[in-house]
Image (tube, rainbow, N blue to C red):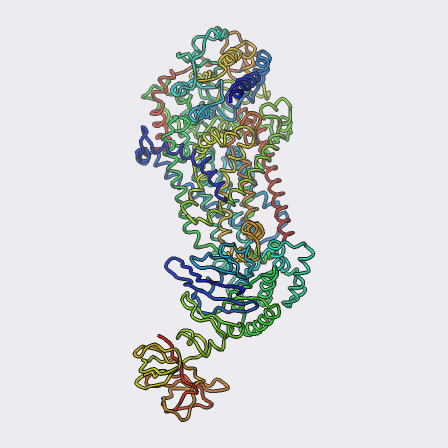
Amino acid sequence: MALLPLLFLALSFFLPLWQVLSQGLKAEGRWTAARLAQLLSDPYVLHLLRFTLKQALLSSLFSLALGFPLGWLLARYDFPGKEAARAFTLVPFVLPPITVALGFILFFGNSGYLNRFLIGLFGLSSPPIKVLYSLWGIVLAHAFYNAPVFARFVSAAWEGLDPGLTEAARTLGARPFSVFLTVTLPQILPAILSAFALVFVFCFLSFAIPLALGGARYATLEVGVYLYARVYLDQGQAAALAILELVIALGLTYLYIRGGGIFTSRGQVGRPQATVKLFSRPRQLFWLPYLFLSVLVFLGPIGAVIADSFTRPWQGQGPTLAWYGMLFSPAQSPFIGGSPLASMALSLEVAGMTAFLALGLGILVCWALRRMRSVLLEALLMAPLAVSSVVLGLALLFAFRRPPLSALASGPWSIVLAHTLIVYPLVVRVIRPLWQGLDPALVEAARTLGAGGFLAFLTVELPLLSRGILVAGAFAFALSMGEMTAVAMLSRPGLVTIPLAIYHFLSARRFGAASAMATILILTTAGAVFLWEYMGRRLLRGQA
Amino acid sequence: MAKLEARGLTKRFGEVVAAQDVSFRVEEGELLALLGPSGCGKTTVLRMLAGLTPPDRGRVLIAGEDVTPLPPEARGVGLVFQNYALFPHLTVFGNVAYGLRFGRRLPRRERSRNVRKLLELVGLSGYERRRIHELSQGEAQRVALARALAPQPRVLLLDEPLSALDAALRVELRGELRELLKRLSITAVHVTHDQEEAMAIADRVGVMREGRLEQVDRPPELYERPRTPFVASFLGRANLWPGVIVSLSSGEALVEVAGVRIPAKGEAPAPGEEVYVFFRPEHVVIGEGPYEAEVRHAEFLGDRWQVHARFHRLPLLLFAHRALGGKVQFRFREPPRLLRR
Amino acid sequence: MRWILGVFPLLVAGACLGAELVVYTYDSFVSWGPAQAIEEAFEAAHPGVDLVWVAPGDSSEMLARLIGERAAGGTEADVFLGIADVELPRALAQGAFQPYSPESIPNLAHVPAELLFDQTGHVIPFDHGYITFVYDSELLAEELIPQSLEDLTRPELKGKIVLEDPRTSSPGLSFLLWTIAHFGEEGWLDFWRDLFPNVLTVTKGWSEAYDMFLAGEAPIVLSYSTDTAYSYIAEGSLRYRVVTPDGEGYRQIEGMGIVSGTDQPELAHAFLDLVLSKEIQELIPTSQWMFPVSSEAELPEDFARYAVIPGHPVSLPPEYVAEHLEGWLSEWQRLLVGG
């Protein structure tokens, strides 16, 4: 029974995806690897491949460096506004690349806030910080996007640890730092590796950020796919390149999953971790430089976008509400499909439904994987996350043009379903390691007590996975809020999500209005995620 | 009709035979212990009884009804897990009430009355709202027991329920456990690797070795009349001497052991067969006798001495009231038993 | 069974009463206003017909969607509006458009012959514009304003120019073609080699580049010749000025066509005619910030004053471009990555 939805998934989505990709393995109707071989001998493609791998590795490492302490902070310390900070960590995730690029330019750019501040402070003649339009600009922006992934994964894993183990290590005479290295770190390593695999794939497939902050000189493989598919209209070459990307991305995922099982901990979820008040001891002042840096990287660009929504560049820097006025003026409404409120409502509706469906589908997939135990299958099921977004768009187009999905072609359902298909692998990656870590005896106990398999799942496994489900739901929600590929391919008149509205404003020269809309996206997402986690945590506490 | 019956249960995991043609019956209110070294397949048998592992062959009958195709939740068995498998997200109350709520689906009020009664029964009144991680090992064991008993299972299965406890507590709790199970006249199967625990707690003990059930009997019979060398040596201290049957007469055989002819009792195969001669140390009477042994060393056990000796190069274990040395003469209180090799 | 056969045509007829004309276009065409005026005029002239705009992407994304949908089994689109002249040969090769009947489009008579870029009779122009450079008069010293393409390579302009990628954006492509037209197939790469040090970054699309320009990242950006008119009319500012190096600018013509296999050919022709009407064409300047194609249309005063038509508009024949584009782009990208 559980396999029926998966069969549906295979027919409705993986089949079209394969149809698009298989063009890369065909030439004049025959199967051949000639296209792939040709690509691998093209110096430009090799240049793209080298650069893509390099920036993805650097970006993942930098994201880890920036995100790990944040996860630590959220797991182990108490400070005012912690829950709000937790919700806020997902904001970067939802911002369309073009808004992030704008934020970086406004903050780190040659005439950005930071440089202007430093020039004023030290009386310099030229901007001292030149991080944009280089590899490091890309790495920094990727860290901005992906450090929260590490922070989330790490804090969720850390909070689920059995404090008895660290206490045991302490009583055995280990100093706090060696306890961390020998007991804590090995236990959260699966979460870190899981996040690393995810972030690496995200950065590997990144397209808009390298182009916006590095420029065309720093193009990734995905640019190649875009060029073949859109500019040269050569679907075969585009598919071949996308296959190359997919093989690398899934290969990494496969290696990770294969190796990952070793690290899975069997920790009992029991006594909650104790937290410490931040800055209750002088040693904790070491946090200050990190906090300063993260405020700069996270809040700087976001703050710059928000500030931009209150200014008109050609009229000096006086604050204005004109852009917000424009958002809500009736004259603008036709082109954002009603009103900004309608866009907000649509985005929330789509993201909310996506989160629920993706959780359902993701959990179902985890369930099926538990029975089948095929690493290869598990890696292949990650395909929607690891495939070029250009190819994904084409596959969705195919999928929603044909039965059974064509029945949903109009209305927000098509976007919801497409987002669900795109987002569920993320849910799988969050929940699966946790599920593998659960003691199977717990379910067996429930079954011998008279609960059927499904009831045992509902009453035992699900509550024990709830922390991961909460995190996965928040990610699914955020990813859907910011998603553009599927929206561009499937949206219909009147269905304008917030990112699409931002995009419309940008191409209509309403840059300030785009910033205002981005501000609305930031606030909506942070608000919704905050509410979701707040209620989730209350529910967890109430039931426990 | 037996309350619980295993018929020819067989299970392989790849090349490993976890259970081979295991059959036994447990009567109403009886407590059967499955005893064996770790890896002998006793837990696999228990899981097949519970429905957690499907057998390759064989059947499980409860009160005459074939439950083999039924899933665990439909069998009416309770299982106490080795590590207790208490639900960490629920309180003590939530754990004990689980089977009443999701299995038997009792109304709330009846549920809480039952839980209170059960907690009283295991001596944990007032623990309802405790979290699992706040319990000591002994308390956790009692909660696990109360939880398994709550839905009033037709058969209770216990998988090494005492192994996580320290020695003193283990002895104390096993007495309580037996007393409780007897008071409630529960039909139970208890898996353990501890022979002392098995004999202390069970009405009958089944000894398993490499997936096979070697013998099922009351503890005294098992001790006195083991049917295989393994059972003989696994329970208590045993002397096992290899020998060859020389001649047979009614009920008795003459066995040549290390060149000496010893009369032995038991089911005997034909003359010329290789057998074991089995006797317990306490069956040996020191002093006068037809046999002679050489003492190697002796250990003081408090109430007596345990003496390690040699009988024509064969090891001999015997008990004495004083430290012995040199050569001793001995005889058997009753003839040793024959065991097939 | 027979009654089903009888009922089915009725159902189809019922669906036709509320007929739909689906127009694929790029997002900003819908967002800037002419789309709404067109819709009102069209639906007033054809009662009971619903004009539906589908515009969730830019021109090349929408064209990709159209072609993709046709390959996947069919599209709802009846008309595609907003195909760039350089994209035409590729779209025609895919058979995306069916030929129009000139006699059903009376307003075509007002379009000058030099703007009719499609000789094959599939696509009609509806507006045109010019790609050139725009500078920030507050950040760029007057003596550095580029009066010629060579001026763009002056060392004083190091890192001061933002360009769009010719592979992913239409202004970027126009500039590449402009340099090829200006310097010839032999000289254009040398010009680019000298230009690159002055390029702060090459963006994916026009929005990113102009956004950077407005944020003060660089004082010169590749953009449209109507930008001064826009910032004066919409924002009352003359800070951003258009300059046409060597008096040149690359001409972009945007066209529209009837999608192959439409079930509404009459309505589609009526739609094309409406877009070419005087009333709609006069909306083009201050909504599209492009020039109308109809000789009947009059330009608004401020637009006429600040929007620049270069003295020497540059363009290359689409067929010639289509033939060589891939080679040019790969040479360009080799230069870009320093290979």
Visible residue check, residue A178: no
Q: Please state which of residues A169 and B11 is positioned toward the viewer in this rendering.
A: B11
Q: Is C113 rendered above or below residue A144?
A: above
Q: Is residue B102 left or right of residue A230?
A: right
**Percent of width and height locating residue A215:** 44, 32
**Percent of width and height locating residue A140:** 48, 41
Task: Name the image quarter holding residue C279.
Answer: top right
Visible residue check, residue B24: yes
Q: Is residue A487 left or right of residue B94?
A: left
Q: Is residue A321 left or right of residue B15?
A: right
Q: Is A74 rendered above or below residue C231?
A: below
Q: Please state which of residues C170 and A472 is positioned toward the viewer in this rendering.
A: A472
The quadrant in which the C terminus of chain C is found is: top left
Task: Name the image quarter holding residue C183.
Answer: top left
Q: Please state which of residues C278 and C149 is positioned toward the viewer in this rendering.
A: C278
Task: Name the image quarter holding residue A38.
Answer: top left
